[in-house]
Image (cartoon, helix red, strand yellow):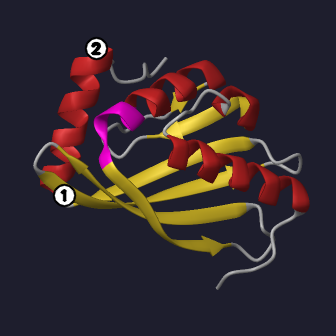
Amino acid sequence: MNRTLPPPIAASLRRWHQMVEASDLGALPALLHAEAVFRSPAAFRPYEGATMVTRILRTVAGVFSDFAYQRQFTSADGMDVALEFSARVGDRQLKGVDLIRFDADGRIVEIEVMIRPASGLRALAEQMERRLALAPPRSD
């Protein structure tokens, strides 16, 4: 069910869509809470901090092609949004969902991504690892 979003969240979500459509995530740091968390579909532990989340999202934007959002769903309180998307990684077509949680000021505090099929997820994980030489988060 789609609901009305609180104004700060609606503004941030508009900026998010503008950045994605323009393939320019330059304004992303301004949308992220300093302690933002990214939950990858390919890693068990989350990646933490706005700097790391920015790095991951900018890299993934370079890996995906033909990226497009199809649907949006909003929680009852408007603090959580689910965005269904499709994209390609090389010759692999995939579908996914971005689960985005905002704070009251409209900053993104958490992004969790789910992707199918497994072959698309594997292709994405391989490209991300290659481009970032990214190790899984530590379990300190």
State the residue at coordinates (28%, 19%): 131
Which image quadrant: the N terminus? bottom right
Label 1 neighbourhood size at 10 Å, few (<14), some (14-19), many (20+)? some
Where residue 24 appears, as percent x and y from the top left, is: 54, 33
Q: Is residue 85 left or right of residue 92?
A: right
Label 2 neighbourhood size at 10 Å, few (<14), some (14-19), many (20+)? few
Where residue 86 appears, as percent x and y from the top left, is: 34, 61
Three-letter code, disc 1: Gln
Q: How many numbered marks are there?
A: 2
| Residue stretch in magenta | 60-65
What is the residue that sits farthest to the bottom in this orientation?
1
Majority secondary structure of magenta residues: helix
Where residue 64 appears, as percent x and y from the top left, is: 31, 42
State the residue at coordinates (14%, 42%): 90
Where is mark 1, residue-wise?
93
Where is mark 2, residue-wise?
133
State the residue at coordinates (61%, 26%): 26
* Helix, strand or loop status at disc 1: strand
